[in-house]
Image (tube, coloured by chain):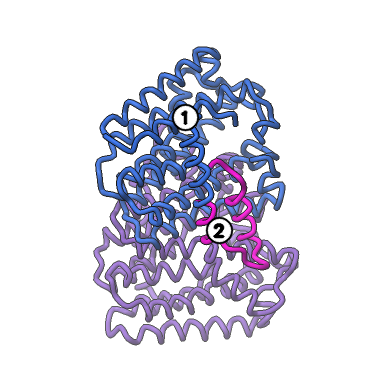
Chain colours: A purple, B blue
Amino acid sequence: MAENFETALIAYARKVEAKLEVLLPFLAGNRLQDAMRYAALSEGKRLRPFFVLASAKLHGVSEPRALTVAAALEMIHCYSLVHDDLPAMDNDNLRRGRATTHKKFDEATAILAGDALLTFAFEVLAEAGESSVLIAALARAAGPRGMAGGQMLDIEAETKGFASLNDISKMQRQKTGALFEFACTAGPMMAGEDVTAMHDYAENIGLAFQIADDILDVESTSTALGKATQKDSTQGKATFVDFFGLDGAKQEASRLVENAKAALVTYEASVEMLREAADFMIARRK
Amino acid sequence: MAENFETALIAYARKVEAKLEVLLPFLAGNRLQDAMRYAALSEGKRLRPFFVLASAKLHGVSEPRALTVAAALEMIHCYSLVHDDLPAMDNDNLRRGRATTHKKFDEATAILAGDALLTFAFEVLAEAGESSVLIAALARAAGPRGMAGGQMLDIEAETKGFASLNDISKMQRQKTGALFEFACTAGPMMAGEDVTAMHDYAENIGLAFQIADDILDVESTSTALGKATQKDSTQGKATFVDFFGLDGAKQEASRLVENAKAALVTYEASVEMLREAADFMIARRK
């Protein structure tokens, strides 16, 4: 992992957290706000915000403007984690090394905090005067044809399984790919410029990220990841590793990362950090 | 109840349902879409969409444009019902005379269908090119300082109770008042005109509606309402009826309706239907 990228990732994460702190200040006696803060301000890689900020920089969009979009996207990512962890969904007690929101508070509060983070993300974007094009893109990425639809397919697979590589790819494109695609294309969208190159980059890193997740799920431990591992195999749900084999999955992930880097060829400069970010998608230790 | 208003309410409801049917078409084998349709297309008064359409008409906004906003608002109202009915929240099995969404499907599907309806509402508005002012107003009304925050206060009152009329009014202004306010001001907002009169109208009818709800909760039966009654008193949660008494509550509701009507004085014509709508807020039989 290049020093350059890791340093930038951490620096951007701190800026996004500072922005989230401003957007979600502590309010004494406000239980909903407490739960929203717990869900949004816990430690995280802030990978989706990174891609917003990096793609914005590549397209000459100011950092303050990009930070608002990055924070809104992170709130949507965090809401999805809160709801996915609920007993009726994945029933997880541990997330980023801490109690999940419904364990720390209660289920009703976790449901509402998720709802409120999702809604507030759109409030923040709209109040900042972002275009309806950008807002529509985020809603599409998070909604029934994006993340929410992907989570439904993932839940259905618990009983039906995944019949083919195509099924699992479709689920992952919706469940996690769509938000990465929004993140990577947010820069050109804000600048009113062509999104094609960043769209190709995003498609490849999104899938690579998921394959790397499935590999980590097999190879890592709960302690290192800060969340439960080997859930998919326990639930009898096929993963990319099942379809490709462990070595095949690693090769496929590498191939996708090379594709992602190649997509950046249209940018003549300033792309080194995004190339390193592509490497990071599968070199993660957690 | 004047014939004029009741006819218009039903006619508008059918138009909103036709719009929802277009926005949420049947998709074979799509469980999430099935659940979204179940939640959004079930029979309802479509009161919030009515106020969008009526206020749009008053401000010369085209009906097709207003129908998109009305349908988006109804999706948000329906999502809130799906989540409020969940076992971890109000734990209701009956809604509009049918099984609630989590009883018809399952909890995970109901949580996701609610999330998806909420997100899709913003997608629909943004894709239609509505302004960030309007989108921000809806997100504010539905979010932590609006509906979601109000639902949290209502849940907290199950253990803490409501200490004062001010507490219960604050909860109701957020939980139900905020969406009514959005509905009534959507017309002038779309037209880029002054929202003051419709804002005053909305504040008064929103509160009147809640007081009428509490009165119905005491006086009506589950069969007539199509949902559980006397839940508040069973839960030991104070209502407007507790603070005002039954007769006092009726008088207060009437006073608010008169205030609402008076707010319309700035409109020189075309207001008769909204006056009748104000009467309807407390004359409802269900």
How far from the left and from the top, in percent, is residue B161?
55, 22
Crowd tier of the residue under label 1, counting other residues whose Cα lies within 10 Å: few below 14, some 14–19, many 20 or above: many
The C terminus of chain A lies in quadrant: bottom right
- Is B118 on the left or on the right of B85, as rendered? left
Alpha carbon separation for disc pair 2 and 1: 33 Å
- Is B49 on the left or on the right of B191, as rendered? right
Residue placed at 47% from the left, 17% from the top?
Answer: B164
The residue sitting at the front extreme is B3
Mark number, residue B21: 2
Q: Nearer the viewer, residue A195 or B22?
A: B22
Q: Nearer the viewer, mark 2 or mark 1?
A: 2
The N terminus of chain A lies in quadrant: bottom left
Secondary structure beneath disc 2? helix
Q: Main secondary structure of the magenta part?
A: helix
Residue B229 shows in the view: yes
- Is B204 on the left or on the right of B120, as rendered? left
Q: Nearer the viewer, residue B32 or B51?
A: B51
Query: Which stretch appears magenta?
Result: B16-45
How far from the left and from the top, in percent, is residue B249?
50, 17
Residue A41 shows in the view: no
The residue beneath circle 1 is B171
Question: What's the chain of the residue with tag 2?
Answer: B
In the image, residue B158 lies in the stretch drawn in magenta:
no
Q: Is residue A235 placed above or below A196 in the rendered structure?
A: above
Q: Amino acid at mark 2?
A: Glu
Q: Amino acid at mark 1?
A: Met
Question: What's the chain of the residue with tag 1?
Answer: B
Q: Nearer the viewer, residue A261 or A169?
A: A169
Residue placed at 55% from the left, 14% from the top?
Answer: B246
